[in-house]
Amino acid sequence: MTASTQASVVSRTLHGSVLVVTIDHPPVNALSVDVRRGLAEAIEAAQSDAAVAAVLIVGAGRNFIAGADIREFGKPPLSPLLPAVCNSIEACTKPVVAAIHGAALGGGLEIALAAHYRIAVRGAKLGLPEVQLGLLPGAGGTQRAPRLIGAAHALDLMLSGRHVRAEEALAMGLVDRLGATDDVLGEGLAYTRELLAAKAGVRPTRAATALADLQAGRAAVEAARKETAARTRGLFSPMKIVQAVEAALTLPFDEGLALERQLFVECLESPQRAGLIHAFFAEREVAKAPETKAASARAVASVGIVGGGTMGAGIAVAVLDAGLPITMIERDEAALERGRAHIERVYDGLLAKGRIQAEVKDAALARFTGSTSYDALANVDLVIEAVFEDMAVKKAVFSELDRVCKPGAILATNTSYLDIDEIAGVTSRPFDVVGLHFFSPANIMKLLEIVVPARVSADVVATAFELAKQLRKVPVRAGVCDGFIGNRLLAVYRTAADYLMEDGASPYQIDRAMREFGYPMGPYQVVDLAGGDIGWAARKRRAPTRDTRMRYVEIADRLCERGWFGQKTGRGFYRYEPGARTGTPDPEVEAIIDSERARAGISPRSFTDEEIVRRLMCAVINEAANVVREGIALRPLDVDIALVYGYGFPRYRGGPMKYADMLGLPNVLAELTRLSQEDAFFWRPSPLIVELVERGADFASLNGAAS
Ligand code: 3H9
């Protein structure tokens, strides 16, 4: 080593004739303006310094570079821009090598693509995940990657956003060499010296030839275009990616770069980019609850699960997948066997799809113990109750848990509506009782509502968050109320849909409008999928306490009275052929709706799809504001993540609160005020919305640093 120059985030050190340029910008070496400047200066320095024969770019810490600094998007651009930095790296007259460890993603991989040679060590993950943020690789990636690895691989990387391991990257030609050890600097230096010794010279990726077979390239672009049209309905950036890769085939490199820039800016300015980047940060922010800062988690090495039904078995798989042993309790041997069989079926399904190997299933089942006696839970660290949704039944379970569990064991309920304070009240240790509300299928759905009753201790809540991390769930903290965050908002969404249906819209039009908005399914398809009987039971349970000012639509009850519970009975709002998952509109249902309208004295009106979306969204946004105001959700962003991860709210709209901010809260308030002339009780504007509009503020202002 002969000389060293320190910039704040990019340092330069001469190792013999190799200039090592190290990016040290925690936490992930994102390409902020300082990093870009440091890189540009390093290339300039290398060019003008006769002592430098080659440049080696490495990242300090756990990653090479995670990409552009996402926090800069939406703000005025600062020079030097990343495409220019990449171009200057490629144009360097001395060989530039990228040595990759950890993440080389997005703009990070584009830096590596602009270098002349690439080496990766084990554990490196490379990818172009911009599509997940509503973007496309905008620093030459759409032009360099196809020239280096061919259009098919490049499109796969850019359209899926997936990360590839070093070995796969080598196989597709994304890197030239795999390091034999984990020492990224040592491996990088050795490789660079080898290149110098071989007089390898510069090798600009713009001149790479993987697109030489034009026919294959065109076929890949056409296939991607078809698939994108069919699969990514509603998303803006995937088609732009296809267009940019097509340009790599048809245009000279610099013209391709110019088109890429234009398409990138279109993506950058789209509301989808704002929604998706909000979701990216919000998803990380939800895991930071006050209790996770205030207390340390308790150790959880074993888990008990009470109930082997669909929910209990799904939770069991989620816990087993995290490598923890479980003890399942059921009331008799037959029920226990059904629970175990259910778990086995889930693993068999995964095996059949090739998602796991047989050993994974065997190892998971080896961690399963079942019992019909609560005494088997004497030593577990945490129990999750997933029995029938009935207060008396839950109380009986918690009395038993209180009797058998060791001191310090955490007692969790998976209730989706019931008052957890009341459940905790039957135990001698309400400070150990918490809600863990999973969503079905529990081994797949990412959302986990962590419901915090009044007397629970902070370390129990912190443990719940830690468990969520272990189970790879997205945790959202919720307070106790009927339905917590998600189901409370779902109820309002459904009610607003029912009002529209009774007032004149067909359930089929409502479903279509919401699908067009971006939901995977409309509200009545969801009812048919979940089973109409579930909502019917809840409506009957709530009937005695229903607010008399609340309008009540009976259409769904009429269907349930006929035994039409949806997919499982072949009829619901739709008709289903045996075994079919998609239904067809049912004229008999429409006749029932007509007669219900007549009975209620309503002359049907017509609604546009846009009006349907506006009403349903206003209902959700308004109730979500109440949820935040009452402290049931910590911040608006917690509501956003709950709905995106648990209820199919389109991620590219960021969640209902972000969507409300994009609509403009004064517009939302004006709409609520207009609607409240129809029904002053249901549509009364939330005081939080009124207050924010008066202050000229938005929901984002309540998110703290995350916005
Ligand atoms: C792009 O590159 C566009 C270009 O093509 C064109 C430009 C012209 N920026 O996830 P973690 C923060 S688009 C700013 O918890 P992990 C993150 O918020 C970009 N901040 O860690 C968190 O902050 P906090 C394409 C970022 O170890 C902290 O870093 N790249 C960025 O589980 C730790 O993150 C991507 O989409 C960023 N780019 O996972 C990659 N990335 O501590 C996005 C992270 O305050 N990043 N932060 O909560 C990732 O996928 C993961 O962060 C990574 C590490 C796998 C790298």
Image: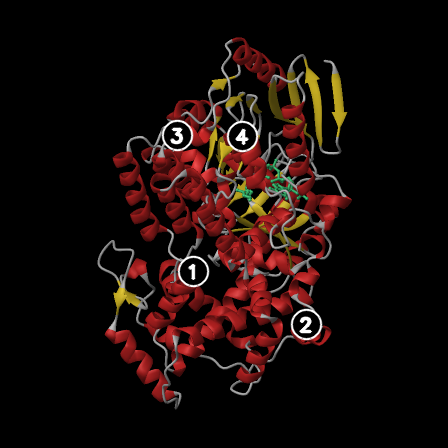
Gap between marks 3 and 4 measured at Cα: 20 Å
Quadrant in which the N terminus appears: top right
Image spot of residue 475 (x, y percent): 60, 48
Crowdedness near tag 1: few (<14), some (14–19) or many (≥20) residues, C-alpha within 10 Å: some
What amino acid is at disc 4? Answer: Ala
Say if 80 sits above or below 683 in the image. above
Gap between marks 1 and 2 measured at Cα: 26 Å
Q: Could you tell me which secondary element the residue under label 1 belongs to?
A: loop
Crowdedness near tag 4: few (<14), some (14–19) or many (≥20) residues, C-alpha within 10 Å: some
Callout 3 touching callout 1 (CB < 8 Å): no
Crowdedness near tag 2: few (<14), some (14–19) or many (≥20) residues, C-alpha within 10 Å: some
Image spot of residue 386 (x, y percent): 52, 49
Pointer 3 residue: 149
The mark nearer the N terminus, 4 or 2, is: 4
Callout 2 touching callout 3 (CB < 8 Å): no
Label number found at residue 31: none
Crowdedness near tag 3: few (<14), some (14–19) or many (≥20) residues, C-alpha within 10 Å: many
Pointer 2 residue: 688
The mark nearer the N terminus, 1 or 2, is: 1
Q: Is residue 667 visible?
A: yes
Pointer 1 residue: 519
| Residue at horizontal 29 percent and vertical 48 percent from the top | 226
Pointer 4 residue: 91
Whether disc 1's CB lies below 8 Å from ligand 1 is answered no
